[in-house]
Image (cartoon, rainbow, N blue to C red):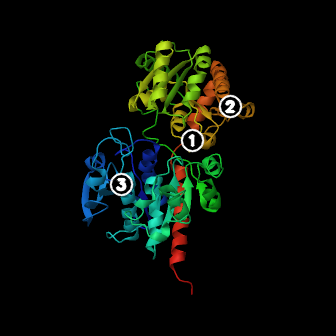
Amino acid sequence: MMGSLPVLSVVSEIFPLVKTGGLADVAGALPAALLSERVAMHSLVPGYPAVLAGLDAAEPVYTAPDLFGGPARLLVARGKGLDLFVLDAPHLYGRGGNPYIGPDGRDWPDNAVRFGALARIGASLAKGTLCNWHAEVVQAHDWQAGLLPAYLHYDGGARPGTVMTVHNLAFQGQYPMELAGPLGLPPQSLQIEGVEYYGWLGFLKAGLRFADRISTVSPTYAAEIRTPESGMGLGGLLRHRAGVLSGVLNGIDEEIWNPATDELIPARYDAGRLEERAINKAMLQQQLGLAAELRTPLFGVVSRLTWQKGFDLLLAALPTLLGLGAQLAVLGAGDAGLQQAFAAAVERFPGRVGCRFGYDEGLAHLIQAGGDALIVPSRFEPCGLTQLCALRYGTVPVVARVGGLADTVIDASPMALGAGAATGVQFAPITTEMLESALMRTVGLYRDRSTWTKLQTNGMATDVSWRDPARRYAALFREVAAEAHATATPAG
C-alpha cells in the first residue's frame, strides 16, 4: 500500500494457520485492522507443517545453509489473506501437533534454538539484509520473539524501531546461559543489563530490556505487571521502564463472532431478536446432556482449565451455583486434575453439569449463543477474548476484576445499573467466597427479566472490534518509527 508504514510482526502462531490460544487470534486479526490506518504489516512465522500447508503462494527470497543446526529458507508468501514471511527450517519446525509441546506433553527440548532462530531471522529481515524489503518498526510478540530487540541492539548500526508486546508475562522463556553463544549473542550481553536473568538466559527479559516500547494487552494489566505481586520477577524492570510501557486492549473479529450471521449456531439473532437465543440454549442443553429447562440460568465456560484461569475456585463454588438452580456447560482442556474434577461433577450432578474436554469451535460459538452467562474467574488475565465474545453475543460475563476483564466489563453495581451502563458482573478479591457472591448476584439479576435484557443489549452495543485498538497501535508504531529515524539521523 503506497505511503503505508511497513511493520514486521514476529510471532510464533497466527490464526487461522496455527493456533493454541489468544496470541494467534491477535496476530491474525491485527494486520487487516491496520490497513485502514495505513500500516502495512507483514508477519514472520515459523514454517510448521500446518503453516506451509495453508499457503496460497510462496517464493524463496533467502537461503541459509546452516541456521542453528540445519538448512533454512525464508519464503515470502500469502496464506489465508495474510502477508507472510515464513521461516522454512524443517529441523526446527517440521513437527506436527502443538508448536511448543512434544508428544510426551513436555516442551520441545530445543525450543530455545527454535525461537532464537525466529528472532535472529526476524532481526535481519527487518533491517533489509535478507531480501529487498525492510521494516520501519518490528512488533515482537511474547518470549518466543524476545531475543529480537537484543539482536538488533548488539548488531549495531541503523535499525528499525521495536515494540515488545506481552500477551502473558507468566511465560518468559528461560534457558541455560550456555546457549547464548550458539544463539549468536555476544559475551557483553551476558549480564544483568543484557540478557541475563537470575543466572539464566531470559528471552522475554531481553525483549523488555532492549525494545524501544513495551505494550501489553490491556491498561490494567500494564499497571498490574509493574507490581511485585504480579510482576513475576520482572516487575522491577517494568517499573524502571514504565515510561515506555502502555496497554492496548485486544479486539475480536466481528465477522467471525457475529450472532446475526453465525453459521455455527442453529438460530441467528441480534439485539432486537433475543428470543431466538432460546433455540440455541435448547441445542446446547441437548449436546451436553443438560436438562431441557429453558428458564433455568445456564452458565458457560470456554477456556483453558488451569489454576491461572481460576477453575479450582469454580469447582469449590459449584454447590452454591447448583443450589441456586443453575446449570453449568464447560468446554476446555488443561490441567489433568481439573479435568478429572469436572468429569466427576458431571457424574455427581447429571443434567446439571455438562463438559466437553478439548476444543470445538462450533460448541464454543453455541455456548456463547445459548448460555445465559459466561464465567471467567481468572486470577490474572492480560486481556481475555472470551468475555468480548460474550458481550457480542448477549451472554452476560461474570469476571474477576483483574487485567483486561476489569477494563472490558462494566459491573452491575447499583450506580451502573441506575445509569443504564452495566454489561456484566465483576468480583474481587479472587476467592471462592467472592465468586459465590457474584454467582448469587448474577442469578438475582437473571430473575429480573427487564434488567437482564438491558445487560444483554448493553453488552451487544459495546464496541469489541479492532477499530480502536488498531488506531492505538498505528499511533504507537508511528511514534516508534519517528524516534528511530531521529536516532539514525545525525544532528546538524
Residue 193 picture location, percent across and down: 56, 66
Above or below: residue 229 compared with residue 10: above
Residues marked 1 and 2 touching at CB (< 8 Å): no
Residue 18 picture location, percent across and down: 35, 45
Q: Which mark is residue 9?
A: none
Secondary element at tag 3: helix
On the image, numbered disc 3 is attached to which residue? 114
Residue 370 picture location, percent across and down: 48, 24
Quadrant where the C terminus lies?
bottom right
Comparing 108 with 83, the one in front is: 108
Residue 225 picture location, percent across and down: 61, 50
Quadrant where the N terminus lies?
bottom left
**In whole angstroms, how far apart are the C-alphas of marks 1 and 2?**
20 Å
- Please state which of the two labelled residues, at mark 1 or mark 3, is closer to the viewer: 3
- Residue 319 visible to the viewer: yes
| Dot 3 or dot 2, earlier in sequence | 3
Comparing 274 with 363, the one in front is: 363
Left/right placement of residue 224 relative to residue 265 reads right
Circle 2: residue type: Ala
Secondary element at tag 1: loop
**In whole angstroms, how far apart are the C-alphas of marks 1 and 3?**
27 Å
Q: Quadrant of residue 119?
A: bottom left
For label 2, the crowd category at 10 Å Cα-Cα, with few meaning under 14, some 14 to 19 and many 20 or more, is many
For label 3, the crowd category at 10 Å Cα-Cα, with few meaning under 14, some 14 to 19 and many 20 or more, is many
**Which residue does the image show at 59% across and 28% down from the upper left?**
313
- Please state which of the two labelled residues, at mark 3 or mark 2, is closer to the viewer: 3
- Residue 276 visible to the viewer: no
Residues marked 3 and 2 touching at CB (< 8 Å): no
For label 1, the crowd category at 10 Å Cα-Cα, with few meaning under 14, some 14 to 19 and many 20 or more, is many
On the image, numbered disc 2 is attached to which residue? 412
Secondary element at tag 2: loop
Comparing 111 with 161, the one in front is: 111
